[in-house]
Amino acid sequence: MSKKWLCLLGLLLIVTALTGCSGDDTTPQEKLDSYVKLWNKQEFPKMYPMLAKESAKKYKEKDFAGRYAKIYQDLEISKLKVTYEVPDQDVLKKQEKQKKATFPIQVNMQSIAGPIEFKSTATLLKEENKDGDENWYVDWDPGLIFPDLADGGSLEVQTEEPQRGEILDRNQMPLAINDVAYRFGIVPEQFGEDKAKKERLASLLGMKTGEIDDALSASWVKPNLFVPLKTLPKTAESAVYELTQMNGVTYTEASSRVYPLGKAASHLIGYVGKITAEELKDKGAAYSANDLIGKRGLEQLYEDQLRGKAGTRILVKQQDGEESLLAEKPKQDGENIKLTIDVNLQEKIYKSYGSDAGTSAAVDPASGQTLALVSSPGFDPALFVNGISQSSLEALENDPQKPLINRFSLTFAPGSSIKPISAAIGLDNGTIKPNEGIKINGLTWGKSGWGGYQVKRVSGTDKPVDVTDALVRSDNIFFAKKGVEMGTEKYESGLKKFGFGEKIPFAYPIKKSQISNSGTFDSELLMANSIYGQGELQASSLHMALTYGPILNEGKMMKPTLLLSEEKGEVWHDGLISKSDADVLQKALRKVVTNGTAKAAKDAKIEISGKTGTAELKASQKVKGHENNWFVAYPTKKKDIVLAMMVEKTEGRGQIVIKRVADILSSKK
């Protein structure tokens, strides 16, 4: 080897030796900077090798990284930001010589209980590693997680559940409230084996004896233990009293969601129930497995407002019992929902149905405020709050009256109750003139192109029939003829002006009323049938009540409201009928009661105006089907409420709808 190469090799060995002796040239600031970057990324395992010897000896890697990760996860730490201050350079150089450097640090983060921030000090030591090289390492203890953990102690998260908001009517009367309920059950050895007694118990609790037997056959049951059966609200006064008098029956008090109107507002208000696994997955961390959640009705629609937000406190507890507060987020109770509904009217309408099925809606035609939304039959919401039994659920599902179906959210054929709207459309477009009559011969009428289909009317007259007479006697042929004269396009356009085929702008989802199954009139015959309320025309009870509004409210159909917080008096559709034509219809609707199809309301305590309707549900003219009867009416003088009531399957009983509406309107204060 040449002398030149020997010199170069010697120089390389010298440099290598010098480098090996000097160790890592990283400064304490650079080391802390690397540590903080990992901390901000929550890469805790990568932080552990940076710990000083004593720290690493005292805290194993799994304890260090695992504790950080668990605490941050349990406290739902986010938006973590760790920063540090660099000391004066002279101070830093002095610290480097002393092999111990300190840096003020600032830690900010968001947690389950809100923001957390603290100041601390990061100390770095210059130590030899296992290879004999020197480097800077973090002198770590739990105080760098949170300062209050420096001397030991543990973290505790406390939660405070919010109170669910209540649902109230327009006069602050309760529709859904938080109240004390009674959880009834029996002690088997005290209750005994009396069969009649058990049957009475089941009746009072709204259960079947088989359900009681199932509860008693549970594996944990012992003769001297209390076996819970059913929770009853305080409003069930008579049942509660009798139950407390029965030997072997006992109860405990429990907070519960209570629905004072029971079945009368069940579809509107809905109920709460235990959250399901699927709901829990959708809702995320805001709920736990034992929480109650709105299941249907307004309880479900306004779940976020009603539920509120839980309060959370993060505490550090020392072994001596001393506590320090790390962060706190006060609970926010749920909002109260105040409705435009009148509980007295709601209950009165529901009770009027008796055992009948049907739907009703009542609105203020001037403001658009909804005063009642009824679906009959209803169900007892209390059955669902604490978990309904399978047999009780099956009984509801198999009930031929279908109490679980919300009828006020659905649409039905309106029958002749649509005729005032058809008349308003005809008057507006000039097809119908107030005092102009047409000659109609016989009780049937049809056109050659209709395949033999005949429109029928109940009664005839030798005199020309005008719009007033047609409404009073509910003349199908008059309206069918005027429909043909008007044409499908004009009638369809008129219905759309009244909101048919359009989503109702309402807080509660209501199925939109339809012109036909296809959304348009595919034939003249379909239109001619629809104009007097048959065909494929469908409307909800709420929409029917709204459509009478323009007749009473200067041609304006108001936007319906359900919450008192909503702006009232907003117009949904305007210019639907002139004042003079509205006067014609108002007089005609009064004559419907005094001289026409609604005579059953003639002797009511107050003057009532309105229009009846019978919708025949059948596949063809040749068969007989069920009949649904309507009466849409209002107080003739005050005109402060329009009530649309429909009762299903009224074959031969059509007058009962008229009488019920008359009684309700007469009793309204």
Image (cartoon, rainbow, N blue to C red):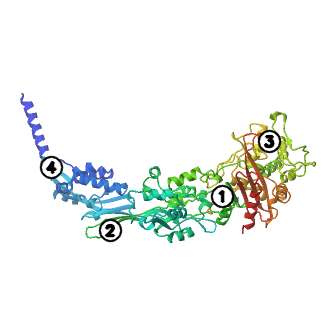
Q: Tag 1, which secondary structure?
A: strand
Q: Amino acid at mark 2?
A: Ser
Q: Amino acid at mark 1?
A: Leu
Residue 571 position in % (x across, y down) = 71, 56
Mark 1 vs mark 2, CA separation in Å: 53 Å
Q: Which tag, 1 or 2, sits closer to the chain's start? A: 2
Q: Tag 4, which secondary structure?
A: loop
Residue 110 position in % (x across, y down) = 39, 58
Residue 6 in sight in this render: yes
- From the image, tell me which residue sits under label 2: 324
- From the image, tell me which residue sits under label 1: 373
Quadrant including the N terminus = top left
Q: Tag 2, which secondary structure?
A: strand
Q: Amino acid at mark 3?
A: Ala
- From the image, tell me which residue sits under label 4: 129
Q: In front here: 73 or 159?
A: 159
Residue 568 position in % (x across, y down) = 67, 61
Q: Which tag, 2 or 4, sits closer to the chain's start? A: 4
**The label number, if any, that marks residue 528 in the structure image:** 3
- 31 left or right, relative to 357: left
Q: Which tag, 4 or 3, sits closer to the chain's start? A: 4
Mark 4 vs mark 3, CA separation in Å: 97 Å
Disc 3 residue crowd, few under 14, some 14–19, many 20+, Cα 10 Å: many
Q: Are marks 3 and 2 in contact (CB under 8 Å)?
A: no
Q: Amino acid at mark 4?
A: Asn
Q: Are marks 4 and 3 in contact (CB under 8 Å)?
A: no
Q: Nearer the viewer, mark 4 or mark 3?
A: 3
Q: Which tag, 3 or 2, sits closer to the chain's start? A: 2
Q: Is residue 591 above or below residue 26?
A: below
Q: Which tag, 1 or 4, sits closer to the chain's start? A: 4
Q: Nearer the viewer, mark 3 or mark 2?
A: 3
